[in-house]
Structure formats: structure tokens, C-alpha cells
Image (spheres, rainbow, N blue to C red):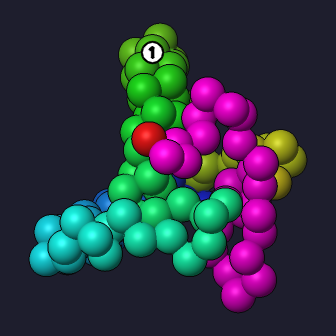
Amino acid sequence: MKISSYQLIVDLKNITQENLQSAENLLQKSDHELNYRTSQESWSALECFEHLNRYGNFYIPEIRRKIVSSRTSSNPFFMPGILGNYFAKSMLPNEKVNKMKTFKSMNPIHS
């Protein structure tokens, strides 16, 4: 994957705005709806947010450190590399649900 750095930032800002709007819409839901699970093993909406918060507590400071210590590049394109591409694509939503295991410490079920 090769994308203009400017376009990547625009796309990420748009996705972030859409996600913020979706999160704002959840404020209209009842506690019962937000805690509802489709099965014993599935996560509720609130447990999904807890999972994201747990990973965010690790990744956000790490990303911030990398940004602060990075050197400015004159390359107008972002090229993530083979592994970066693989992991980024594996987390994108698609028609077929891509189930992944999480570390026990990051599993929010019943929290």
C-alpha cells in the first residue's frame, strides 16, 4: 500500500469523526442495551469500549513516544511495509467477521 501522507491524514480525520458520531449516538441507548450480549461468550457494547480503552492505555503513549522521537520525512507518501499492511488490513471491517483472540488481560468480559 502506498498512499499520500496528506490523504491518509484526511481519511483518518474523517474516520475519527464518523467514530465520534457513532459513539455520541450510544449516549441515547439505555444501560440495558449497552450491556446486552448476543451470547455468553460475546462482548457487550460497553465491554468493546473497555477492550479498546485497555489497548489504548498501552498503544497511545507508545505512539506518542514514537511521534516525538521521529524525524521529519520529506517523503509525501506513507508506506507501512508488509507487516504494517497485513495488520492494518486485518482490523478493517468486512463482510466476513474476522474473529481474533485477545490477551486475557485485555479481555473485558464481565467487567
Q: Is residue 99 above or below residue 68?
A: below
Question: In this figure, which residue is indicated by the disc labeled 1?
Answer: 65
Secondary structure predominantly adopted by residues drawn in magenta: loop
Tell me the element at label 1. Answer: helix
Q: Is residue 2 above or below residue 82?
A: below
Quarter of the figure that contains the C terminus: top left
Q: Nearer the viewer, residue 21 or 52?
A: 52
Region in magenta: 87-110
Q: How far across and down, in percent of the image, does residue 35 sit?
A: 36, 64
Q: How far across and down, in percent of the image, does residue 77 sit?
A: 59, 52
Relative horizontal placement of residue 85, taking residue 31 as reference (left or right): right
Q: How far across and down, in percent of the image, does residue 13 sit?
A: 32, 61
User: At 68% from the left edge and 32% from the top edge, which residue is drawn?
Assistant: 104
Asked whether residue 6 appears in the rendered view, the answer is no
**Furthest-front residue in this view:** 40
In the image, residue 24 lies in the stretch drawn in magenta: no
Q: Residue 67's image quarter? A: top left
Q: How far across and down, in percent of the image, does residue 39 sit?
A: 62, 72
Relative horizontal placement of residue 19, taking residue 51 as reference (left or right): left
- Density class for disc 1 (Cα within 10 Å; few <14, some 14-19, many ≥20) is few
In the image, residue 103 lies in the stretch drawn in magenta: yes
Name which residue type carries label 1: Arg
Asked whether residue 104 appears in the rendered view, the answer is yes
Q: Is residue 82 above or below residue 23?
A: above
